[in-house]
Amino acid sequence: MKQYDYLIVGAGLYGATFAHLAAKKGKQCLVIDKRPHTGGNTYCDRIEDINVHVYGAHIFHTSNKDVWTFVNSIVEFNRYTNSPVANYKGKLYNLPFNMNTFYALWGVKTPDEAKEKIEEQRREAGINNPRNLEEQAISLVGKDIYEILIKGYTEKQWGRKCTELPAFIIRRLPVRFSFDNNYFNDLYQGIPTGGYNRLIDGLLKGIEVRCNTDFFADRQYFADTARQIVFTGNIDEYFDYKLGHLQYRTLHFETEIRNCENHQGVAVMNYTEADIPYTRIIEHKHFEFGTQPRTVITREYPSEWSAGAEAFYPINDERNERLSKEYQKLASGEANTIFGGRLGEYKYYDMDKIIENVLAKEI
Ligand code: UDP
């Protein structure tokens, strides 16, 4: 007799949401996580009375009303709107690419002038059918923006040439011919009031959770304890890497307390030049409009993943896409295991997509 209906491996957003919905339907769940805390990469530490996004900044945004209603039923969200600033060789530009950016770059003041400038650069480049990120970027916003705001940042982020990356990564970023610095096009956006831990704690309320518990340390025991497994770890590890290793990007963070109230005036400052080794500096208090006397900042350094490091991003190149499809084929043959989340599916999901996927599951 199995003790649980579901063993959920990983207490991140996917696992916590799944557990919440399953428990609501009267299912017995056990959630395990190898880390000492729940929340996966949304986890926040409290430093100087500020919620510090320990595993990188998370900004919730969605156009899906069901998803927004669901997360707001767990915790209230604030009105934070992401408007990052890019710093290139000491000069500042608004993101995403919009009239403020075009004005700072070229002095153009109208949408027509900006479009003409981009069109001119696009013509010069002669790209009709973009095959990679570089060509996609140049054909969307022209060579200047590509060189100043995209190339260095993207190559640092992914550790690969823009010519070797797929075009879709850059399509995440809006291009606007209005003076609108909102990074996202989504209808809804915000940060849980009081931080992400409140969202995760709300989801996991009343559910049995064991932290510091590694599924792979006693796989058979865990498999025997539940009727179904929900696996949100690395899909290649689940299959003992039998088709080979998938690659990931990892991040390294340098967090510092600053003895001033406001260090950079914005939550996210991207450093888009190649010579600066970090991609961005996060000033955490701005996510929640903090007025604490001091501030906490984090520099974010991307690097290639190796065993033992935290896997943050799946790599979107041909080799990894192909290999992950092979693993997904194996996964569909595992009748008693559901694979979910960024690592379980090896997909560059945003948080709202994770919730959407769980809401669509038959539990
Ligand atoms: N990007 C860029 N310059 C920037 C910010 C983003 O070129 O200043 C590109 C880059 O290729 C990056 C992609 O846009 O990988 C997506 O960025 P986003 O900020 O959405 O990534 P995430 O927050 O998921 O790390």
Image (cartoon, rainbow, N blue to C red):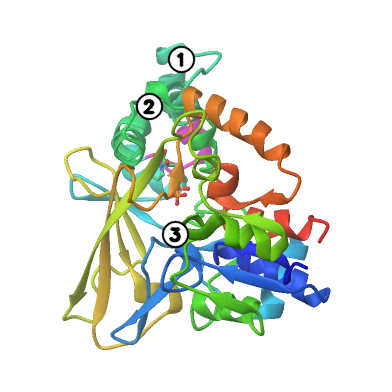
Where does label 1 land, which residue?
123
**What is the chief secondary structure element of the magenta stretch?**
helix
Distance between the Cα atoms at labels 1 and 2? 20 Å
The mark that comes first in sequence, 3 or 2, is: 3
Where does label 3 land, which residue?
83
Question: Tag on residue 17?
Answer: none
Where does label 2 land, which residue?
162
Q: Give the quadrant of residue 155.
A: top left
Ligand 1, image quadrant it occupies: top left
Decide: is 83 above or below 150.
below
CB within 8 Å, label 1 to label 2: no
Q: Give the quadrant of residue 330.
A: top right
Q: Give the quadrant of residue 204.
A: bottom right
Q: Position of residue 331 (x, y in %)?
A: 66, 39
Disc number lying in front (1 or 2): 2
Q: Position of residue 119 (x, y in %)?
A: 48, 23
Q: Amino acid at mark 2?
A: Cys
Q: Is residue 8 left or right of residue 271?
A: right
CB within 8 Å, label 3 to label 2: no
Number of labelled discs? 3
Decide whether residue 24 is among the magenta residues. Answer: no
Q: Amino acid at mark 1?
A: Arg
Most extreme residue toward the front is 1
Residue at 41% from the left image edge and 14% from the top image edge? 125
Disc 3 crowd rating (10 Å Cα; few below 14, some 14-19, many 20+) is some
Distance between the Cα atoms at labels 3 and 2? 24 Å
Distance between the Cα atoms at labels 3 and 1? 30 Å
Q: Nearer the viewer, residue 292 or 157?
A: 157
